[in-house]
Structure formats: structure tokens, C-alpha cells
Amino acid sequence: MTDYKKAYLRRFLFIGIAVIILVAGMNLPVRWLSLTVVLIAALVILYHFNGISNLADRQIQEKAAKEEEETSFYPSKQPSPKRKQDIIYYLMTCLFVALFIPFELTGRLIENYIEWKPYIFDLLIYGGLISFFIAWIYYKRFQVIFSNKERGYYVVLWMFFVPLLMIFHATAWYNHLSPSPVIKKERMAISDRGGNHRHGNKYLFLTINNKKTRFELPKYQFEKIKNEDSLLITVKKGALGYAYVGKFEIITH
């Protein structure tokens, strides 16, 4: 018999730790690292909230079984055909991997947002709600019953993460690629610059509102910049309303 009190406490403990990490991650100086930490912490929080929901369902089922009450809401279910189990499991796993691989590529678009936190909050709130609703409908109405319960648990998770990643990629690219009006052009002094040698990323820091903000540049343009140069940035309003730097022009002295 599961000790539900301890199970609930563990879930809430992990949620508390993830909330602390999320808040700390939002203040990291490197925007791309901050984005990654915030997203992972948010996913951990949603994962454990889903676990709490599953614990509550299991507790209700065990109580009903103990009292020998048969209801239509919790019918006894036999495992689905093995072929169906394999198709659903491998399909959802492949979709998750395929959507997670270009995560960094899409993240580079957000690297050049003027303010990226509003986008992340909207993604987690609206995208998270949509994804949770899809996973909940699958779990309650269309769930494939696996002989291996661990596989069934992973499929429920993929039912949440796959729609969320789809929304992440679609909104980031749509906001960036759709024709966007120019908000302003402004000359900015370069505060600092550097790069990620492992991934080949080249970035620099510009001081905006008395705060250093990191932006990513193409390698060919980055190598032309000298220490005394400044940049003329073109700020555009994205299709979804999130402003980003659409163009960097080097101004030499």
C-alpha cells in the first residue's frame, strides 16, 4: 500500500525546489542559460503537479476497490493490443526527441528578444494549460493501457511535452519570421563580447536601460567587430507582439 502522505510531501518538496531554481534562473546573466534553466524548472513543476493529480486518482481507485464499489468512472481495464502499445509508445517518443533536438536553434531566436521573460511566461501559462488539457483528455478518455506501466506513464508525459514543444517552436518562429514593422533604430555601445566555443555561438552585450543584455550575432559579422566599434540595432515588433533585434549594423570609428 502506498504511503500517500509521504508521496505528496515528496512531490511538494520537488515543486518548492524547482520554484527556487526558476526564480534564481531568471536572474542569470547569460540569457540562453537563463532560458534553459527557467524552462526546465517550469517543466519539473508541471511534471510534479501532474504526479500529484495521478496520486489523487490512484488513491480514489484504491479506496473504491477496498470498499468493493464498482463505478463506470473507474472500470477495470485490460491491456491494449501489444501492437497498439508499441506504435503509440515509439511514435510519442520519436516526436518528443524530434521536437527537442532543435530546441537550441529556436532558443537562438529568443536570444535576440528585447524582453524574453514575457514570452516565456505566456508560453508556460497558455502553452502549459493547452498541453495539460491535451494530456488530461488522453489520460481520462483515450488512454492506451500498457502491460508495462512505466511505458504508459512516459506516454502521458509525452502527451504534455510534445504539444508544449510544438507551441514553443511555432510561436517563436512565427513571431520572428512574419513581416514585422520597425519600431526604432538606435546606436548602442558594445559592453562586452564572447562566445561558446563548443557550440560555435558568438554573442555580445549591449547596455539597455542600464542593464547588460546579451545578443547573438552571425559568426561572419561578429569577427568584423573591433573593440572600439558600436552597433546600430534595428528593433522590430514581432507578429505576436514580442520585440526583437532584427538587424545589427557595425559602426566603425
Image (cartoon, helix red, strand yellow):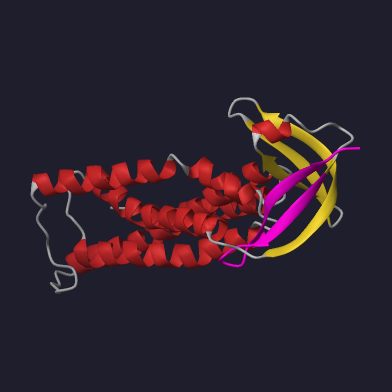
Looking at the picture, tell me which residue is in the foreground, 225 or 71. Answer: 225
Task: Tell me, yes or no, if residue 3 can be seen here.
Answer: no
Choose top left, top right, bottom left or bottom right for residue 202: top right
Count of numbered circles in the view? 0
Which residue is drawn at the image coordinates 76% and 45% (left, top)? 249
Q: Where is residue 59? Give x, y as percent.
A: 30, 63
Q: Where is residue 104? Give x, y as percent.
A: 53, 41
Choose top left, top right, bottom left or bottom right for residue 82: top left
- SS majority, magenta: strand
Would you say 182 lies left or right of 123 here? right
Which residue is drawn at the image coordinates 39% and 64% (left, top)? 132
Looking at the picture, tell me which residue is in the foreground, 154 or 218. Answer: 218
Looking at the picture, tell me which residue is in the foreground, 146 or 166. Answer: 166
Q: Is residue 249 magenta?
A: yes
19 up-or-down from 205: above or below: below
- In the image, the segment drawn in magenta is 231-253
Q: Where is residue 122? Give x, y as percent.
A: 56, 65
185 up-or-down from 232: above or below: below
Would you say 206 lies left or right of 42 here? right
Residue located farthest toward the top when viewing the structure as drawn: 197
Which corner quadrant holds the C terminus?
Answer: top right
Q: Is residue 115 magenta?
A: no
Which residue is drawn at the image coordinates 14% and 74% (left, top)? 72
Looking at the picture, tell me which residue is in the foreground, 9 or 36. Answer: 36
Q: Where is residue 146? Give x, y as percent.
A: 17, 49
Task: Tell me, yes or no, if residue 136 can be seen here.
Answer: yes
